[in-house]
Image (cartoon, rainbow, N blue to C red):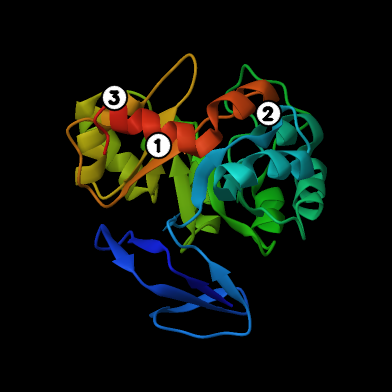
Amino acid sequence: MVVRGGRVLSVFTREWLDADIAVADGWIAGLGEYDGREVVDATGRHVVPGFIDAHMHLESTKLLPDEFARLVLPLGTTTVVLDPHELANVLGTDGVHWLLDACDALPLDFYFMAPSSIPASVFESPRRPLLSGDLESLLRRRRVLGLAEMMNFPGVINADPNELKKLELATGLHVDGHAPGVLGRALNAYVAAGIRSDHEALTVEEGLERLRNGMWLLIRGAEPARAAPAGRGVRHEPNRVLHRRPRSRGHRGERAHQRHGARGGRRRGAA
């Protein structure tokens, strides 16, 4: 298939290219001048990559995955990375394995992070705690990319053996963070443990320090907390990601998911 006549955004060089797009077996094969059995006329249109929601909790949308896909695909979101933390609290690993199966073969690409904090603290009462063996079974699934947000950041920073064992399971995989207000030596220890990202930076100082430590900074838009201010003043950093927190079905239709987040980020100077 060839997409012809559109202006193509290069996210690597931040420029618009007048080029055809060649697609083979679902993959972009090249940009340039191409002919193909099927030609899609994109004259007068801008062609951009699909949005990827890098961290979300599908349960908070109150939607099954097929209905969620039906709503967000027309708005430009083509891939989501789920942390099924809430489902795991209620149904344990059985619920997570069910959701993995339920998302298979849907037109929206669903990837997962294994919930690392069940329970997140001694004050929670899940169906049962997720132990290392549970996480190991989830990490073997094809679309599980690593460990979800390590919410017990005091345990990680203070080298709690249970938390370090979870991190050891994810060696070589991505591990998401969750460390609001953590700075200085405490943040250094958190990063040294293998945490690769954080979506809880609420100030420019917190955002910059995470970037200086080599972390991915996830700038989220959500009620009641908004982390978009953390993106101000870090305009051209490559390891910065905008993501949306879960909304109800009504909000998704009204505010266009990732597209709304991108517009809001630009208004706040997080370009």
Position of residue 219 measured from the top left corner of the image (x, y, whole percent): 37, 34
Callout 2 amino acid: Thr
Q: Is residue 257 above or below residue 49?
A: above
Q: Name the residue under label 2.
A: 61
Which element is circle 1 on? helix
Asked whether the beta carbons under mark 1 and mark 3 sit within 8 Å of each other, the answer is no
Is 202 on the left or on the right of 175, as rendered?
Answer: left
Q: In this view, does 153 lie above or below 47?
A: above
Which element is circle 3 on? helix
Which corner quadrant holds the C terminus?
A: top left
Q: Mark 1 points at which residue?
A: 262
Residue at left offset 26%, top offset 23% = 203
Callout 1 amino acid: Ala
What separation in Å lies between label 2 and label 3 (alpha carbons)? 24 Å
Position of residue 168 measured from the top left corner of the image (x, y, whole percent): 50, 56
Callout 3 amino acid: Pro
Position of residue 234 measured from the top left corner of the image (x, y, whole percent): 20, 38
Res. 199 in view: no
